[in-house]
Image (spheres, rainbow, N blue to C red):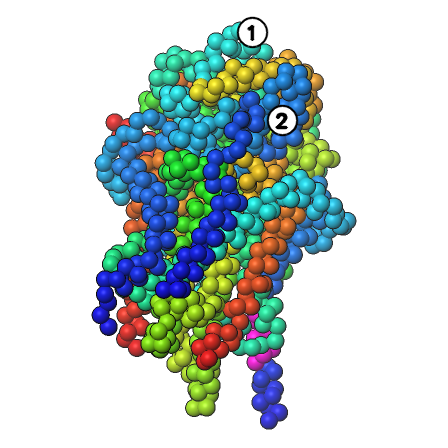
């Protein structure tokens, strides 16, 4: 018995060492970012110490004020929340249809969708801009949101279809016989079962929208509508990059995404999906 | 079916929410916020620009709005999207070579400023070289109407910075930097022997390595020769071009280059020089401000790239206008924009800008009260490349830069590199036909 | 079950919102851009010059640098498919095992994808730096003194692999959470039953986890192919395609042409590149389907 206990301990020890090693490489840049954000510009590279000699917490205040984060923050939250909601809602409907329902042109549409995932077009913002102009959506939040939402769809549909394909059909068929509508099945059975996938998508799309700035800068003119990334530009000058303030700004801008991740990863936790299946 | 109804009503509610937040319809206040809108890419100058705009508002009642967007690629994307949709601001810069600027002019996006430049001797306040890049000459290959098309705000040039303390440390005379190529190589060897990295530059950015090579192209070929090379009359396999490639090989063999120089961007190179990790840096006059921000006590001076003994022509350097502003031909506020730029290039404003951003003003009359190093740079403006009616295609320039890197990493010999470039030149000539 | 036309229309309603948005804001701009690939145009000129397939021909036969960049991306992709995904799967399995501190690990592993490219580029450039880098410091203190001055990102032999390592490091977190999400959908009772039958961990993995995970693995593989073939930010911030073009990938190439005013040519490159990706991805889907049915 003792031997088995030892073996188990050893096993978990090895596991922790392996996980810990990877974890350290992931943590180091964060540590470095925060440590750099507390240094001063003239010492940050001349004295490469792990910890700052003097902890300049005021960098955070300066960065927050200088980058005008207060003004941009709400915009970013709005774009991210609304954008992600619609991406998930619209794509889960479509993905369910692609996985379970019959309708004309199904295969062609799906492959077309996937094809757009595959073809990177760097100049696509130009026709997009002209399109928004003819729709009167230049410099509007709606215009930017519509771009964000449609950008996220293909990937979300692709991922969710994979999950829906995988769900056991029996539950749904039983519900159908019980008189549930198709939408009811989608809403009450498929969506809850796909919770881990949806949580994953929420994380990824939040990250994309939160960090996006090319489209925002091209489409929007009015500073009052700009997202948080607009603020970070202040520190990356053509000539001078203010590294400590940039790092402070990046830290501030990273925190909300980490929070989203923490909130969402609960739903990727063991038991929820399995429990639903059992019930 | 009931479920579908809830779904529809929920989505309508959400759509309403979105619209109310984003202000679906037109903006309520249609009147413009400013009389003149300027899009600029140097976010590090935002504060200085805003102060100037405030002064101008006080003096004239004209409201000028500076919007800065960085990095430069994003700014460029914004400009090109705005151009295709005809939504350019009153003042901007397309940030491109002459060929592309010519497209903007020919498409009617950029105003010809020649007449205004002639008025009250506006154009005479500038360094002559500050205008060359904004000037299209008669007979230029893009059929642009000859004239001046932009207002330079500042000027710059590229020279070699050197760290005086490190020079002393290696037993070199900091007041007597190397003047000829062989002295330069010898100095490099001494620095290396003293365990100091001799030379750094942002050679990972093609244009910088290209600019270094071009100095020697002017040195060896002169204006006529440079032009004939562009026209294809002199091949890149000419022994003088092979010599240029050999210079880089020589620097490599003498271990002059800092580690990783071929993939280094200029900001990294600047950091390396500012922190005393390399003794010499090929960089522009903006470096003065950069080095000050990273290491205020850095003890340095500048020198021209060392000349070659066999060269028959003067050594010229990359430089000229630093940042220029173009005026939107279609803007209803064209005259107001011109008036503002005219004001901006006058003595007091130029002095303010020069001091706030540590740059060389384009207005030569105020270039006197500069720091010693900037003074050397400003005297050097006269030695920058001359304006040409033709430019080399970017593909060939790109091949030159890549092959220079290739020589530095020892992948190709100078002869092979020159042959590669000539091959691309011939492909481009064929494609042009 | 027969499907009535009414049902078909009802079913179609599910995809209408996605379809409308997709057609207007994704497909239309893409098709407009495609059109450009037949023109020589710099984005500014009033007139676009119709050149037909000339640009395609030039790319196919006269632009070896573009094909070299394709190979570079292929190299990074193959490394990512094997090493990065292997690591992601391993970590997902380990974290899924109800070990102590599972929550903490799960959070930490997703940090690299969250971090800004600026930070990642800066840090890794410090790691790889020839003179002052952490990597060389470790190597020399371990006795490998010939690495004292070795600039990892600037040597032909190591530049591409060094960039690939950073790419994999930044990307494994994505695969990790998708695989973890996939693992969660596997019913626990399957494992309970297997344990009753006396199956060990490897047998459980082989007979339950892996087969049920294949659709998710396929998704992760395709995402890896897309992400790695289209890698851009990291390369641009670390090497700009250097030394001497040895770390160029298709997107940096396309970007280079576009920023030099070659709108038409760069879209033609994008189309060719897209077709290559299309073929690779569908081959991947086909193979995994076949593999799945064969079992």
Q: Which mark is residue B49?
A: 2
Position of C134 compared to B230: left or right?
Answer: right
Residue in view at x 33 percent, y 34 percent: B424
Q: Are marks 1 and 2 on the same chain?
A: yes
Q: Which mark is residue A23?
A: none
Query: Which residue is at the far right?
Result: A54
Residue in view at x 59 percent, y 34 percent: B43
Q: Secondary structure at mark 2?
A: helix
Residue in view at x 39 percent, y 69 percent: A185
Front residue of this view, candidates C6 and C135: C6
Vertical comparison of B142 with C87: above or below:
above
Tell me which corner region of the image, top left, top right, bottom left or bottom right, holds residue C207. bottom left
Residue in view at x 35 percent, y 49 percent: C20
- Residue A155, horizontal then vertical, whole percent: 40, 56
Position of C286 compared to A255: left or right?
Answer: left
Using the rendered image of the protein, determine whether residue B386 is visible from the camera's viewpoint.
no
| Quadrant location of the N terminus of chain B in the rendered image | bottom left
Tell me which corner region of the image, top left, top right, bottom left or bottom right, holds residue A177. bottom left
First in residue order: circle 1 vs circle 2: 2
- Residue A2, horizontal then vertical, whole percent: 62, 92
User: Secondary structure of the magenta portion, mostly?
Assistant: helix
Count of marks placed on residues:
2
Q: Does the magenta run of residues contain C251?
A: no
Q: Which residues are magenta?
A: A11-19
- Residue B81, horizontal then vertical, whole percent: 42, 34
Vertical comparison of B179 with C37: above or below:
above
Using the rendered image of the protein, determine whether residue B24 is visible from the camera's viewpoint.
yes
Name the residue that disc number 1 marks: B121
Q: Secondary structure at mark 1?
A: helix
Vertical comparison of B104 with C9: above or below:
above
């Amino acid at each position: 018995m003792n031997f088995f206990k030892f073996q188990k301990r050893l096993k978990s020890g090895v596991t922790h060492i392996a996980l810990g090693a990877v974890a350290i490489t992931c943590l180091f840049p964060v540590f470095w970012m925060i440590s750099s954000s507390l240094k001063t510009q003239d010492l940050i590279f001349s004295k490469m110490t792990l910890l700052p000699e003097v902890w300049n917490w005021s960098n955070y205040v300066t960065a927050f004020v200088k980058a005008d984060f207060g003004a941009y923050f709400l915009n970013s939250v709005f774009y991210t929340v609304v954008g992600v909601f619609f991406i998930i809602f619209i794509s889960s409907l479509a993905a369910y249809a692609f996985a379970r329902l019959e309708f004309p042109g199904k295969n062609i549409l799906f492959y077309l969708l996937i094809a757009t995932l595959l073809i990177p077009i760097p100049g696509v913002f130009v026709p997009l801009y002209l399109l928004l102009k003819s729709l009167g959506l230049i410099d509007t939040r709606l215009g930017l949101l519509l771009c964000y939402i449609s950008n996220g769809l293909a990937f979300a549909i692709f991922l969710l279809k994979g999950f829906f394909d995988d769900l056991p059909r029996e539950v749904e068929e039983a519900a159908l016989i019980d008189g549930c509508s198709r939408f009811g099945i989608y809403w009450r059975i498929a969506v809850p079962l796909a919770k881990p996938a949806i949580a994953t998508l929420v994380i990824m799309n939040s990250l994309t929208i939160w960090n996006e700035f090319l489209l925002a800068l091209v489409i929007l003119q009015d500073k009052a509508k700009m997202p948080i990334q607009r603020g970070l530009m202040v520190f990356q000058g053509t000539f001078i990059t203010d590294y400590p303030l940039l790092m402070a700004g990046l830290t501030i801008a990273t925190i909300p995404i980490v929070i989203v991740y923490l909130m969402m990863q609960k739903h990727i936790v063991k038991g929820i999906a399995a429990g639903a299946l059992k019930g | 079916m009931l479920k579908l109804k809830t779904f529809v009503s929920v989505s309508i509610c959400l759509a309403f929410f979105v619209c109310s937040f984003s202000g679906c319809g037109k903006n309520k206040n249609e009147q413009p916020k400013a009389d003149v809108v300027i899009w600029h890419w140097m976010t590090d100058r935002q504060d200085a620009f805003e102060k100037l705009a405030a002064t101008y508002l006080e003096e004239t009642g004209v409201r000028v709005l500076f919007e800065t967007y960085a990095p430069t690629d994003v700014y460029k994307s914004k400009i090109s999207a705005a151009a295709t949709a005809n939504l350019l601001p009153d003042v901007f810069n397309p940030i491109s070579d002459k060929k592309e600027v010519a497209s903007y002019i020919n498409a009617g996006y950029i105003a010809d400023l020649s007449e205004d430049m002639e008025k009250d001797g506006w154009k005479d306040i500038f360094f002559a070289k500050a205008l060359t890049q904004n000037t299209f000459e008669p007979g230029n290959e893009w059929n642009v109407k000859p004239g001046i098309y932009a207002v330079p705000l500042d000027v710059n040039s590229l020279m070699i910075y050197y760290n005086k303390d490190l020079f002393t440390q290696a037993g070199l005379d900091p007041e007597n930097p190397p003047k000829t190529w062989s002295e330069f190589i010898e100095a490099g060897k001494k620095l290396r022997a003293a365990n100091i990295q001799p030379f750094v530059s942002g050679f990972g950015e093609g244009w910088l390595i290209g600019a270094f090579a071009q100095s020697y192209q002017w040195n060896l070929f002169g204006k006529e020769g440079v032009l004939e090379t562009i026209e294809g009359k002199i091949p890149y396999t000419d022994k003088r071009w092979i010599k240029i490639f050999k210079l880089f090989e020589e620097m490599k063999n003498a271990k002059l280059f800092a580690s990783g120089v071929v993939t280094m961007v200029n900001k990294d190179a600047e950091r390396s020089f500012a922190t005393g990790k390399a003794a010499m840096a090929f960089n522009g006059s903006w470096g003065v401000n950069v080095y000050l921000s990273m290491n205020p006590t850095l003890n340095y001076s500048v020198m021209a790239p060392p000349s070659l003994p066999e060269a028959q022509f003067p050594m010229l350097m990359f430089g000229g206008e630093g940042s220029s502003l173009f005026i939107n031909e279609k803007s209803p506020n064209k005259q107001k924009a011109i008036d503002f730029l005219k004001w901006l290039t006058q003595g007091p404003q130029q002095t303010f800008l020069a001091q706030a951003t540590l740059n060389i003003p384009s207005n030569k009359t105020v270039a006197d009260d500069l720091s010693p190093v900037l003074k050397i740079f400003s005297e050097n403006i006269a030695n920058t490349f001359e304006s040409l009616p033709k430019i080399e295609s970017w593909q060939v320039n790109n091949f030159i830069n890549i092959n220079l890197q290739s020589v530095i990493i020892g992948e190709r010999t100078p002869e092979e590199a020159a042959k590669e470039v000539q091959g691309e030149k011939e492909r481009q000539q064929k494609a042009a036909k | 079950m027969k499907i009535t036309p009414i049902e078909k229309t009802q079913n179609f309603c599910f995809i209408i919102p996605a379809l409308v948005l997709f057609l207007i804001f994704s497909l239309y701009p893409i098709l407009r851009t495609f059109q450009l690939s037949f023109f020589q145009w710099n984005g500014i000129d009033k007139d676009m010059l119709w050149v037909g397939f000339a640009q395609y021909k030039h790319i196919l036969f006269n632009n070896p640098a573009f094909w070299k960049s394709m190979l570079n991306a292929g190299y990074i992709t193959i490394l990512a498919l094997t090493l990065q995904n292997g690591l992601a799967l391993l970590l997902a399995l380990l974290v899924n095992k109800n070990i102590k501190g599972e929550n903490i690990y799960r959070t930490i592993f997703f940090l690299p994808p969250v971090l800004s490219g600026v930070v990642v580029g800066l840090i890794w450039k410090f790691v790889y730096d020839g003179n002052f880098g952490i990597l060389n410091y470790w190597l020399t203190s371990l006795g490998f003194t010939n690495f004292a001055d070795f600039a990892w990102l600037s040597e032909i032999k190591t530049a591409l692999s060094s960039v690939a390592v950073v790419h994999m490091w930044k990307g494994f977190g994505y695969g990790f959470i998708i695989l973890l999400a996939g693992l969660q959908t596997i019913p626990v009772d399957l494992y309970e039953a297997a344990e009753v039958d006396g199956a060990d961990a490897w047998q459980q993995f082989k007979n339950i986890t892996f087969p049920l995970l294949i659709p998710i693995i396929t998704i992760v593989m395709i995402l890896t192919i897309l992400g790695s073939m289209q890698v851009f930010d990291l390369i641009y911030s670390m090497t700009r395609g250097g030394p001497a073009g040895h770390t160029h990938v298709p997107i940096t190439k396309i970007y280079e042409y576009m920023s030099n005013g070659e709108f038409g040519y760069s879209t033609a490159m994008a189309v060719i590149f897209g077709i290559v990706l299309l073929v690779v991805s569908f081959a991947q889907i086909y193979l995994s389907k076949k593999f799945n049915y064969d079992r």
